[in-house]
Image (tube, rainbow, N blue to C red):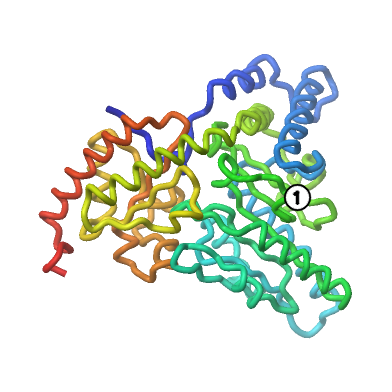
Amino acid sequence: MKVYLDYAATSPVKKEVLEVMMPYLTANFGNPSSIHAWGRSARGAIDESRETIAKFLNCDASEIIFTSGGTEADNLAITGIFNFQFSIFNKFSNDKILKPHIITSQIEHHAVLNTYKELERKNIAEVTYLKPNRDGIIEIDSVKKAIRDNTVLVSIMYVNNEIGTVQPIREIGKFIESENKKRKVDGGRRLYFHTDAVQATEFQNMDVNSLHVDLLSASGHKIGAPKGIGALYVKKDTPIISMMHGGEQENGKRAGTENVAGIVALAKAAQLISQNKNLKIKKLRDYFIDKILKEISDTELNGSRDWRSPNNVNIYFKYVEGESVLLNLDLAGIAASTGSACASISLSPSHVITAVYDDAERAHGSIRFTLGDETTQKEIDYTIEKLIEIIERLRLMSPLKKGNK
């Protein structure tokens, strides 16, 4: 039996998505910047797709920038805002570099964390990395306490890619709006709010007005579109400087010939999203969690049970190594992960679980299972059956087991 439980890493392209994108890989292959019929056809497809994405996010089409994926969207949001603010900070500074301040969390995706670390490496930014609470949640009070006079950007992910915790984005956004009203009266600099919503897109409220965000990143291959396409929402009058130079595509914010087939696919995938499926997936998720915790001793759920994505199950199996569990699951035909797929080639423990629990051993012994549209209870039952066998076998030979620590 083959069981795919790694939807947070990537999802299969949906049949309806493949159907609408195929013509733009074959007959309708024109460059959207060309003025002939082939080009106009491609341009029309992009315009229509931009309107579809805008409707999904409840924003204006002019506020959507298509990118190569979530990583580029995150980078463009962060460096775009930062570079503009840095230029303002240092416009009349002749003696020393004035550093804008940024607030983020310790549990962000590496696309966000490594972008900030690069700014720190260049010694041009001050960055505060907020620690999550024991449930893996960034508390709004910690955001409030971290605000400084020189703070220009707050970036908190919507849903954590490893432990599935849902962050209070709307509450943080409303606070930042109120802070900006005070700053306007005092003549202070405006704060901008970015969220990496890559893991949230399929399951959470994505109305950018309801969320009170200035920038939001999304990725196609997490929602049934192919890899290589993403989008960045940039609220009107939010100043960002392009990080790619060339043509004037995407309103001059993202140079390069557009990925027409990918853009059409992203729009269709967004169109197919239905919140009605959340209940079905959540029911399977809860069944999976309850069975594991009941049937396998010395296991714990990582992250909040209540504030959690409906498709995420992240379990700490004591006295075993996560990599060994994964290899044995793979031999049984089951796909899962130890954390972020983007960091899977690294042997370092999960930075997310380490940040939440201050426990490297827990990080090494944790497995992430993520469910999707096609997941069935039969697949979950098979996975639990195999897990019971695998954990028992590995614990018998483990130097970490009770009494051998």
Q: Give the quadrant of the N terminus.
A: top left
Nearer to me, 264 or 247: 264
Q: Is residue 251 above or below residue 162?
A: above
Nearer to me, 400 or 248: 400
Q: Position of residue 126 (x, y in %)?
A: 64, 75
Q: Is residue 391 left or right of residue 109?
A: left
Q: Position of residue 73 (x, y in %)?
A: 65, 49
The residue lying furthest to the top in this view is 27
Tell me what residue is drawn at x 52 percent, y 57 percent. Answer: 110
Tell me what residue is drawn at x 79 percent, y 51 percent. Answer: 235
Tell me what residue is drawn at x 38 percent, y 49 percent. Answer: 368
Residue picked out by circle 1: 209
The residue lying furthest to the bottom in this view is 95
Q: Is residue 167 above or below residue 404?
A: above
Give the structural element (helix, strand or loop) at label 1: helix
Residue 247 in view in this figure = no
Q: For residue 78, what is the image quadrant?
A: bottom right
Nearer to me, 66 or 252: 66
Please, what is the three-letter code of the amino acid marked with disc 1? Answer: Asn
Q: Is residue 10 above or below residue 99?
A: above
Nearer to me, 383 or 237: 383
Q: Is residue 287 left or right of residue 128?
A: left
